Structures are given as structure tokens and as C-alpha cells.
Image: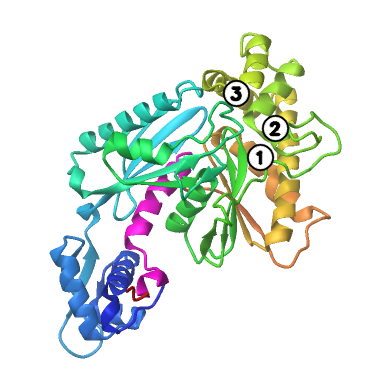
Amino acid sequence: MRRGTNLPAIGGYNRTVVLDAVRRATEGASRSEVAERTGLSAQTVTNVTRRLIDEGLVREGGTVIRGPGKPRTLLHLVADGRFAVGVHVDPAVITSVLLDLEGTVLRHVSSPTPSASRPDEVVALVARLVDGLIVDAGVDRAAVLGVGLAAPGPIDVRAGLVLDPPMLPLWRHVPLRQALSTATGLPVLLEKDVTAAAVAELWFGTGDRRHLAFVYYGTGFGTGLVLGGEPVRGASSNAGDAGHIMVASRGRRCTCGRVGCVGELITPHALVRQAVEGGVLTAADVSDAALAEAAASGDAVDMRLIGEAFHALAARADAEDGPARRIVEAAARHLAHAIVIQVNLLDVDEVVCGGPFWHPIARLVLETLPEEVRRSPALIAKHPVRVVESAVGEDVAAVGAACLVLDNAFSPRPSAMLIRA
């Protein structure tokens, strides 16, 4: 938690410091407790909380007796004081969620992604989903802070562009942020999907999570990073491209020209391809022609087909079908190798796995993944490394995108302390 300052010129920063302190106090906090936790004077806290109550963001409720003197009135966050929408655009599925100030998911909706060659169709669909969420929840649109948009990278955050994501090969410099803002009439924040997923873990995870890697398993593969309790974005906000980590000396040639890239070995598309080539999946599950077309075009219609085949493969593996199980177990070993490389490089002590396609293979992969990481001869064992499943669920990127809106509006930032001319 950041601490405030009693200087008169930076009330906006103190406002977010106090609100953040109240938000974190799930059972409520008195003004004196807020002052103690933030380093602000009692008078400053009183002034700030008065404004927050007037804005409908904080309420008084209940009392507590701590020490001598009269009972202290508790402050609570007004959960329905404001709302945020989160959207995750994946090549196979679009997910939208509506969150209140406490981060509770009030509404959820998902829809297959329209043709990846038509970004305008995607924008129109997302706008309809967002409008539907707000209307169905009976929320005053004026209370919606904005839309967080999680998209596959690479992205240009400053310009609001989705540049040229590998799984959306016909998308080039798409102005997705502005297009969605125009379509919805709401401000939009653009974030890379793996980073949004890591942010969700920061908001909803338990304990003091300072250094973690979020292993994102969706249509593609990547890593969201948290170091020192803050998400790592990098120079262009595109940190986390992990698909070209080499984990094998043999295998299918990657688009980069090399063999052994983890993204070519463990993604849903890759596992389905292995299952088709090995006779584990037949034409009843997915046709070779359709799979070949998908590999060539990357079109979202075919990605949905691959998604269906992936679920069929995962179900067989989960039911102890030997060949299917071996495909998933091999993917777990490759994933462990990639995780070890990142743990050694970044010195994280927690690895969280999740994403849109994670759940179908989670049980089987987690049977071996933690031990594969722990026993790897390549692991430089400076400290224990926890390997766990995300508690947020498969909508983690959409939830994280909404959390970014809340974070942007209400989390204290040192830049707010600058005195501008």
C-alpha cells in the first residue's frame, strides 16, 4: 500500500491513497486506522473521506471499539458506486465482464470471434456485448468508468493499435481502442492480454504476491510478469512474448525458422495437430482439410473448430486414453522447461497458470508440472517455486482488463504528486 502526504497541492493523490486503504480493508476501517496505514494526518483523512462520501464511493457503517474513548465509525467501500467493463479479444472467443468497485463479477458474456479478417465486425460485436452487460445489470451508464481491452500482442499502447498478432494474420495496425471507444461512447484502456491476466492475479490473489509469472494458455502462449508487486510491461508494453523459448531439439519448424519453440509444441492448435497426425483424433473430431486451412489462414472460424477438437483431445486424455494422455504429458514437460528458464531469468517465486484453454488440461498438467519444475536439473534453486492454477478462472484476461480500469481510476500513483504548471 502506498502512503500519502499532507502537502496541500496533491489532494488527488491522497484521495486515491485513502480510497485504496478503504478498499483493502474488507471488514471496514476507521478514520484513525486509515490515517495510520497511509501516513496521513487525521484532518487530511477526515477531509478526504468527506469528499469520497459525497461522491458515493465510501460510506459509513458500524462501529468498533479499539482502545479507550468512544467507538470509532467504520468506513466501507460502496461496491456499486462505480463499475468497470473488461473485454478480452481472443482469436477464438470474445469475453466481456462487468465488475463493481470491489472487483465482483456482476455479469459475464462470451461469443465466438467473428472472422479475423474483419476487425470492424469484432468492434461491432464487442460494442453489443458491452451494451448488453450494462443494460442487463441495470447499471447507470454514467457510473461506468470505462472499458479495459485485453488483446493479443504486439500492441501500440500509446496509439491504441493492435499491430500484427500472429493468430490474427490479416490484422495490421488496427486502431482498436479508438474504434471501440467510438462505438461504446466510453473511454477505453488497451492492454496486452498476458499482462491483464497478471493484473487480475494481483487483485484477487491471496497473500503478499510480489514476484510471479502468469503462464497464459489461450489460443497462443505467453507470460504475464509481476516483479516487486507491479506488472512488468516493458519499453513498448509488449513484455511476455514467450512462445519462441526453445525447449526441444526436434519438432515442427516454427514460423521463426527454428525448431523446438514452445509455442509450436504446446498451444491448442499444436496439440490438435499432433493428435490428428498421430491418429488420436479422426475426421469425426476435426478434418485434416479444415486443420490445414486453419494452419494456413489462422481464421477465427477455424480456430473455433480447433477449439472443439482440443476439448475432445483433453476429454480423452482426462479419461485415461493413453495416446491422448501422452500428448498432454509431453506438453507439460515442454511447459516445465519454459517455466524453468523464466524462473531462472526473472527470479520469481510463484508461477500461476490459466487462460481460456487452460481448464480442460489443468488437472492432468498439474499432476506433473510442479514436480517437473522442481526436479529440473536446469533450475537454479535459490528458493521454493510454487506452481498453481489461477483462482480467477478462464476469464482472467477480461477480469484483469476491468481491474486495470479500476486501478487506473483509484489506485495511487506517484505521478499524481507532480505539481504541473
Q: Earlier in the sequence, mark 3 or mark 2?
A: 3
Q: Quadrant of residue 70?
A: bottom left
Comparing marks 3 and 1, which lies closer to the viewer?
3
Mark 1 → mark 2, Cα distance in angstroms = 7 Å
Residue found at the very far right of the displayed protein: 249
Q: Is residue 412 magenta?
A: yes
Q: Quadrant of residue 153?
A: top right
Q: What residue does disc 1 label?
A: 365
Q: What residue does disc 3 label?
A: 298
Residue 181: give x, y in percent of width and height: 33, 40
Q: Earlier in the sequence, mark 3 or mark 1?
A: 3
Which amino acid type is shown beneath numbered disc 1? Val
Write the residue at 54% across / 52% down: 237
Foreground pick, 291 / 332 = 291
Majority secondary structure of magenta residues = helix
Foreground pick, 403 / 357 = 403
Q: Quadrant of the C terminus?
A: bottom left
Residue found at the very far front of the displayed protein: 421
Tell me the magenta residue range.
393-417
- Circles 3 and 2 in contact, beta carbons < 8 Å: no
Q: What residue does disc 2 label?
A: 328
Write the residue at 74% across / 25% down: 322
